[in-house]
Amino acid sequence: MFGTAKRDTALLIIVAILTLFAPFLLNPFPAGSAMAQFNAGYPDLMQRFVIFGIFAIGFNILFGLTGYLSFGHAAFLGVGSYAVVWMYKLLDYNIIWGLPLAIVISGVFALMIGFISLRRSGIYFSILTLAFAQMMFAISYSDLLGRFFGTTITNGETGLQVYRSDPQVLIDSWESVPHLLGLVEMRSTYTMRLGDWSFDFNAGYYFCAVIMLLTFYLAIRIFRSPFGMMLRAVKSNQQRMNYTGLNTRPYALAAFVISGMYAGLAGGLMAAMDPLAGAERMQWTASGEVVLMTILGGTGTLIGPVLGAGFIKYFENIFSKINDNVLHSWFAFLPDGIEDFLVVIVHPFVGKGWNLTLGLMFMIVVIFLPGGLVEGGQRIARLFRRKSARNDAPDGSKTPAE
């Protein structure tokens, strides 16, 4: 089915089901309960899950298949965002114009940066991509191009926004937020209430989810194609391939461009959900974040980057909201001295210190699960299979012959 093997088709269907029912799966606790703090089924966070999933899937095509570690992929994320907001300013709020432009422009930037960076490998390649990304961040933050051309291009540290004075030659009077062909607004949300539970179904989330499924399917086809096999060979032993007379640079460059286009699409979707674009999306921290997502989920696996993106974004948005008042409410049933002691112990790992929790989890995964969360799932599955095989096996007793 879909031109893929049964195992890949099953994986695609599982991802589609999880995505479709995400509003239910991410809101397991009643809205008014103390555990509602851990619910993640609100539209903004769900959109981030799938958008950064796209970003990580694209990055994994480069890093997971070729072994080239880029520290500058956030540059393409920012380029995609700026492209979509410029389409808002010039045409209208229809997101369909900006997304193809975001993919094309980010692909062009990736081609130029990759052509230069891929002349080196290893840590030198990583440093080159980081240098290019930081240059693009500095140019965007200072609006250097705008000063050169005498007009605003990125609007500097304020960020690019849509104003009433913008041309918007195709806009209609009813348009005020991003929409898809005038049929549905990205912010439109339907809330379903079932007893104490509340579930939000957001149009923007499902639009991004459909695109994520398409990009996931495309990644499957790339992984299983002869092109993907060649990329694995580049990662395995590029020097030996060069000795055979095969030029590997075009394959690595193609992977770099495809990965950059994925990042541009993710950046475009961020602007499609919220019509803003700023230089902070190009910072080195954003590039490092997608590296963590891919490694945590499982480098070189199909579903790993999606799991890693959801894992990190969940902790970033849920753990960072926990403050001392929440901690005191959790431990209120304990004596005052023990309650205060536990709050002091837990405080460094939540709120503004959530990065410490993420760092510890990253260390644990790297040390004990080199294959990431996917390897952890595989180990659990093997454990259950062994138990099932043990239960089904005969006890080994023999019946004496008569």
Image (spheres, helix red, strand yellow):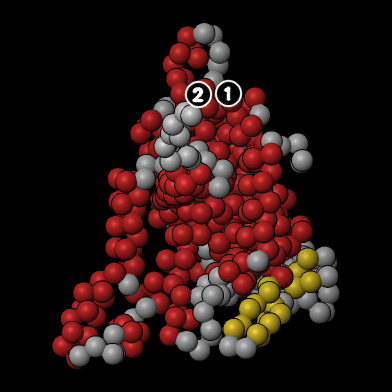
Please, what is the three-letter code of the amino acid marked with disc 2?
Answer: Val
Residue at 59%, 25% (x, y): give it.
Answer: 229
| Distance in Å between CA atoms under marks 2 and 1 | 6 Å
Query: In the visual, does 302 lie left or right of 70?
Result: right
Query: Badges 2 and 1: C-beta atoms under 8 Å apart?
Result: yes
Which residue occupies the foreground of this view, 159 or 237? Answer: 237
Q: Callout 2 environment at 10 Å: few (<14), some (14 to 19), or many (20+)? A: many
Residue at 54%, 9% (x, y): give it.
Answer: 245
Q: Position of residue 385 (x, y in %)?
A: 49, 45
Please, what is the three-letter code of the amino acid marked with disc 1?
Answer: Met
Q: Element under label 2?
A: helix
Which residue occupies the foreground of this view, 114 or 16? Answer: 16
Q: Position of residue 203 (x, y in %)?
A: 72, 70
Q: Mark 2 — residue? A: 234
* Residue 299 visible in rendering: no
Across the whole image, how many numbered discs are drawn on residues?
Answer: 2
* Residue 367 visible in rendering: yes
Q: Is residue 96 above or below residue 199?
A: above
Q: Is residue 276 above or below residue 253?
A: below
Q: Mark 1 — residue? A: 230
Which residue occupies the foreground of this view, 271 or 352? Answer: 352
Q: Is residue 339 above or below residue 65?
A: below
Q: Position of residue 25 (x, y in %)?
A: 58, 69
